[in-house]
Amino acid sequence: MAAELTVDRGALVVNWRRLAAVARGAECSAVVKADAYGTGLEGAVSALRRVGCRTFFTAHVSEGIRAREAAPDAVIYVLNGLAPGTAGDYGAWRLRPVLGSMEEIADWSDYVHATELPGEAAVHVDTGMNRLGLPPSAWGEAAGRRRDNWLGFEITLLMSHLVAAEEPENPINARQIATFDEARALFPGVAGSLANSAGVFLGREARHDMVRPGYALYGGNPLPGDENPMDPVVTLSVPILQVRDVAAGDGVGYNATWTAARASRIGTVPLGYADGFLRAGSAATGERKAEALVDGVVCPIVGRISMDLLALDVTDVPAAARGTDAVIIGGALDVDRVGRNAGTIGYEILTSLGRRHPRREIGF
């Protein structure tokens, strides 16, 4: 018996269409980095391409190549920029680098001039993240080189990344929107993209010509604190291997960090941190962290999550037995709640999902 990860491609498509409707006229692309947030890159790209998604973003060239194989006619940008020695891979697979420094712009220009390829690319301007992207001091130089036809390639997208879009009242959003407007004024005629999943909901001034949702496509809540407008995409369930009785005072799991306060029934399931279920969800005595649904009842995970196994307190589920399914992600346990229970975010839960359990795609 093993865990089964179900990916609902129909829900993925519904979420993309919902975000496209909110974007109201801006192109809705799809971020499929990190194996489409753990849900399977090729399946996500294929499903979204068939319903009209034209542009995809990956983090690495290797992901871009996989996306290209799944969507031969799509536009594919690689967010992490142009690493030294990789220009040939971009050219061979018709990938567009997101250039974030004058060095990258110069390298790409040299490659395009040498190969006489079209060489379309995006330029990333930093509006406050202080991570990747051209600092404001370099915007004028880049714009001047474009204006003087020095580049040799077309800038097809000017983009930046929001710092705190999931906090609508945070003043940094307004500052970044204004700063990005300043950058766009230096690159007339170039399409702009600023909004991530949460940014789609910040208003028209954040959307520009293209929005770049990622997390929300896969069921994550782009509006923390409000009802999630997205459909769930991922369900992770696993059958219980064994149910045993433990007496009050008995310990469970490594180092007996959790002891039963009452006579209890403990269900052991074959899922652990090797499967991407974070050890941080472990619960010592008196703590409540990670949970699972058994027969519709929310049951706490007790003791330490080990490499291959975890333990559930199923005392309040009389029907729990060998073979009963425990839902780890799904239903009341959406990916955001699972992330909070493990002291992290739903992004990490999705992208940590292991490859040992079988995957099933439905809905498309």
Image (cartoon, grey):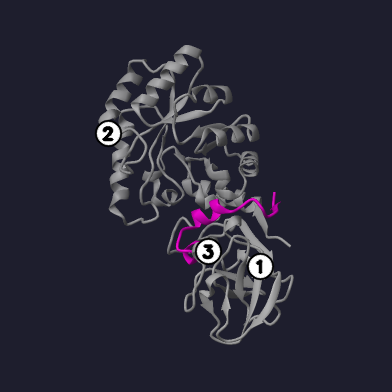
For the residue pair 162 and 314, the one nearer the viewer reads as 314
Which residue occupies the foreground of this view, 195 or 293? 293
Q: Position of residue 225 (x, y in %)?
A: 42, 64
Residue beneath disc 2:
136
Q: Is residue 209 left or right of residue 329?
A: left
Which residue is nearer to you in this view: 160 or 133? Answer: 133
Residue at 59%, 56% in the rendered image: 274
- Measured as percent of width and height from the top left, residue 303 is found at 54, 72
User: For residue 107: magenta?
Assistant: no
Say which of marks 1 and 2 sits in front: 1
User: Badge 2 local density, few (<14 within 10 Å), some, or many (20+)?
Assistant: some
Q: Earlier in the sequence, mark 1 or mark 2?
A: 2
Find disc 3 in the rendering and name its residue: 338
Q: What amino acid type is highlighted by mark number 3?
A: Val
In the rendering, at what x and y percent does residue 320 appear? 69, 77
For marks 3 and 2, give the one nearer the viewer: 3
Q: Position of residue 361 (x, y in %)?
A: 69, 51
Q: Which segment did they paint magenta?
A: 338-364
Is 329 left, or right, of 205 in this rendering?
Answer: right
Corner quadrant of residue 298: bottom right
Give the residue type at disc 1.
Answer: Val
The amino acid type found where label 2 is placed reads Pro
